[in-house]
């Protein structure tokens, strides 16, 4: 336990340098130690349990297996990150939870999404509408386009309150005012009457967060919530989300390609590649001790301030595979430095390598020995 | 906004002046002379002296620029002059027909909006289903069918169905009654041409609504609205429709302006004495003063409609602010 705390301190420092914010280290330290034992599947029922989810897009170019049998859980109040590069299926997987995949061409073809024990894929349209926005809310990537340009901020907040909680207009207005204050928007009274184009990107994302918090959901799915924002604003928004989710006990799924975000804000991490989860584990553990060549590659392609400066970064060569043409082997093998013959014929399963740390790689064990020495 | 409105209204003056210059001089390029036409229209002999007197009466013997400024000066005073053909004041000639044309244009526009927006929206929501195909077929048919032909079909249909159901053939009244005198008689005459033209002009607006709606439904904010758990109906009516209406408003505005003076053939079919018919008569008669006034009237309607469309834009989309 003591060593874990220690490593968390180190790791927090690293990440805080990455994101350019480092003011709350002591708090983080205490929090990290307390929260560590919780996420590892100790709790009795998971809030969200995704099992073998498959989402495909039927296009003229062929069937795209965007999400290909992913399984993960989210515990109440926990922050889970889904990491991967563009097009790996992380957003589609998140949109599948709320069944917001445009159909056609997309369709969830298999699996189960159990929210508080209930399979959402069996729910009726009406039941899904009741869950969306009330039990599970979403924060989207593009605050510029995700707010309706012709409706006032106030209206976009109150409509959810009126719809789900049956509030009257004045009550909803009062609550909207309170929510805007909560997400740190100055002069909320004036903002309520303004339109999205009057607000900056960071402000809009705060409004999105306020919208997500409207009905005090149990789970918020944030799909790349900071990608479209300035770096300085990114840290603010993430701090805000972290703070509010902790305070209100809301579970959070953060979808991101930013490992700095993962390291700083997530309890657990799922790394996705080509529609599959290829590594899962505690955030600190994955950061320190990656057991999949792809995760390792991701970490290496990010500049590190805690390591001696190298001449250049070490990116992953090649392109992600075409998701319409996947064979039975490991999809990462063409880009993998550790590939063996077996990788071409058989996709490794996601298996425990060390306690709660899972990896889908035939070479997971070899990776620890060789690579950590090398780096 | 206030300043913008004033500016726009003032800008109408040069636009209208340009239209006046064009119509005045273009008309005089048409070969032929109203006095010869009026006096010798039937081919009989005409005394040169009589033609001269007629030209003097109508100020046609003065230089063209004098005629032009006389006309403009009168126009500015609100005096449109008299028709060269009938000798009646032009305001009198236009007034009754304007009333009729305006009513048909408004009714046709309302019908076209009532058809286009719901149909276009449904067609977009049910994209690539049989509903979509039916709506698209319906609107293509509207474009393909000339409205006068549709008009003839409507009259025939009325005759046949009333004969079959009520035992006596009924036809829309031929004489125009203003709506405040007898609304029933008025509507039973004007609803048919309004339906025929409204259907025709709804076609473009329907397709416009459909494509704008399809585009808007793919927007991120519609996904956000879905993620809030709103009902599909609310998403479409509150979130999508207002965004999709911008291009539709433009099309409908231009159509309305066109309907005011452009329904020549439809008026013929329904035997309406509207502006379109007056227009054609004025041009064939070389009735300069009447043609000029009519063109200016239509130009004014175009300019004002455009202005109203711009104001509607600002109301629909708060990002548009004129200054």
Image: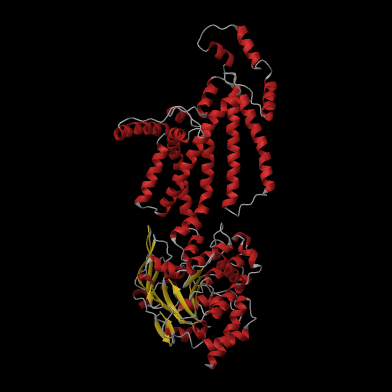
Number of callouts in the render?
A: 0
Residue at 53%, 90% (x, y): give it: A4
Residue B235, position as x, y percentages in the image: 47, 59
Q: Which residue ends up furthest to the front in the rendered image?
A: B181
Residue B32 against residue A270 in the figure, above or below: above
Residue A193, position as x, y percentages in the image: 61, 61
Q: Nearer the viewer, residue A359 or B323?
A: B323
Q: Nearer the viewer, residue A309 or A46?
A: A46
Where residue B271 sits, quadrant-wise, is: top left
The reply to whether residue A199 is visible in this rendering is yes
Q: Nearer the viewer, residue A256 or A128?
A: A128
Q: Nearer the viewer, residue B264 or B17?
A: B264
The reply to whether residue A88 is visible in this rendering is no
Residue at 59%, 84% (x, y): give it: A28
Residue at 50%, 36% (x, y): give it: B105
Residue B310 against residue A284 in the figure, above or below: above
Q: How is the image coloured?
A: secondary structure
Where residue A68 sits, quadrant-wise, is: bottom left
Residue B79, position as x, y percentages in the image: 66, 26
Residue A148 against residue A277 in the figure, above or below: above
Residue at 47%, 38% (x, y): give it: B108
Q: Which residue ends up furthest to the bottom in the rendered image?
A: A2
Q: Is residue A95 left or right of residue B318?
A: left
Residue B26, position as x, y percentages in the image: 60, 25
């Amino acid at each position: 336990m003591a060593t874990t705390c220690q490593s968390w301190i180190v790791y927090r420092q690293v990440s805080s340098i990455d994101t350019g914010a480092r003011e709350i280290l002591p708090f983080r330290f205490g929090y990290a130690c307390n929260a560590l034992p919780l996420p590892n599947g100790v709790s009795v029922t998971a809030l969200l349990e995704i099992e073998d989810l498959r989402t495909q897009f039927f296009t003229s170019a062929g069937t795209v297996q965007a999400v290909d049998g992913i399984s993960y859980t989210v515990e109440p109040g926990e922050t889970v990150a889904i990491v991967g590069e563009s097009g790996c299926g992380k957003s589609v997987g998140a949109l599948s939870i709320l069944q917001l995949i445009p159909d056609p061409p997309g369709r969830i073809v298999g699996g189960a999404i159990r929210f508080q024990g209930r399979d959402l894929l069996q729910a009726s349209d009406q039941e899904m509408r009741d869950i969306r926005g009330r039990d599970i809310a979403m924060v989207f990537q593009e605050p510029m386009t995700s707010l309706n340009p012709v409706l006032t901020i106030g209206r976009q907040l109150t409509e959810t309150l009126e719809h789900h909680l049956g509030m009257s207009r004045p009550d909803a207005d009062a609550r909207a005012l309170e929510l805007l204050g909560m997400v740190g928007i100055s002069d909320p009274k004036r903002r309520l009457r303004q339109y999205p184009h009057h607000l900056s990107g960071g402000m809009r994302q705060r409004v999105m967060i306020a919208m997500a918090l409207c009905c005090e959901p149990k789970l918020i799915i944030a799909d790349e919530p900071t990608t479209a924002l300035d770096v300085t604003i990114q840290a603010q928004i993430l701090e805000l989300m972290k703070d509010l989710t902790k305070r209100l006990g809301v579970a959070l799924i953060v979808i991101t390609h930013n490992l700095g975000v993962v390291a700083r804000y997530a309890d657990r991490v799922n790394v996705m590649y080509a529609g599959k989860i290829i590594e899962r584990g505690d955030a600190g553990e994955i950061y320190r001790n990656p057991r999949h060549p792809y995760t390792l590659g991701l970490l290496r392609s990010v500049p590190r301030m805690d390591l001696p400066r190298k001449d250049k970064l070490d990116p992953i060569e090649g392109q992600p595979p075409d998701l319409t043409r996947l064979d039975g082997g490991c999809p990462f093998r063409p880009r993998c430095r550790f590939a063996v013959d077996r990788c071409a014929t058989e996709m490794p399963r996601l298996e425990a390598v060390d306690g709660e740390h899972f990896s889908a790689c035939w070479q997971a064990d070899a990776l620890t020995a060789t690579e950590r020495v090398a780096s | 906004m206030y300043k913008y409105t004033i500016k726009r209204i003032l800008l109408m003056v040069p636009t209208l002046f340009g239209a006046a210059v064009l119509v005045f001089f273009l008309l005089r390029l048409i070969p032929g002379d109203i006095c010869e036409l009026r006096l010798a229209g039937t081919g009989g002999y005409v005394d040169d002296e009589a033609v001269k007197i007629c030209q003097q009466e109508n100020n046609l013997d003065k230089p063209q620029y004098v005629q032009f400024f006389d006309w403009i000066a009168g126009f500015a005073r609100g005096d449109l002059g008299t028709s060269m053909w009938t000798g009646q004041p032009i305001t009198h000639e236009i007034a009754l027909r304007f009333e009729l044309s305006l009513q048909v244009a408004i009714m046709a526009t309302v019908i076209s909006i009532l058809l286009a927006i719901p149909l276009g929206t449904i067609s977009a929501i049910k994209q690539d289903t049989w509903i979509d195909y039916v709506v698209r077929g319906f609107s293509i048919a509207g474009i393909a069918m000339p409205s006068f032909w549709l008009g003839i079909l409507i009259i025939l249909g009325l005759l046949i169905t009333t004969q079959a159901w009520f035992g006596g053939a009924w036809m829309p009244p031929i004489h125009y009654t203003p709506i405040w005198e007898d609304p029933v008689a008025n509507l039973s005459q004007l609803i048919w041409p309004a339906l025929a033209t409204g259907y025709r002009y709804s076609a473009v607006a329907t397709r416009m609504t459909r494509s704008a709606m399809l585009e808007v439904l793919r927007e991120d904010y519609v996904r956000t609205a879905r993620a809030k758990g709103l009902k599909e109906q609310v998403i479409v009516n509150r979130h999508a429709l207002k965004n999709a209406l911008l291009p539709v408003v433009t099309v409908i505005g231009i159509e309305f302006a066109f309907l005011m003076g452009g329904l020549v053939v439809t008026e013929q079919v329904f035997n309406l004495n509207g502006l379109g018919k007056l227009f054609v008569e004025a041009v064939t008669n070389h009735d300069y003063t009447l043609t000029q006034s009519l063109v200016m009237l239509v130009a004014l309607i175009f300019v004002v409609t455009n202005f109203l469309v711009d104001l509607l834009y600002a109301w629909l989309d708060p990002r548009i602010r004129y200054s």
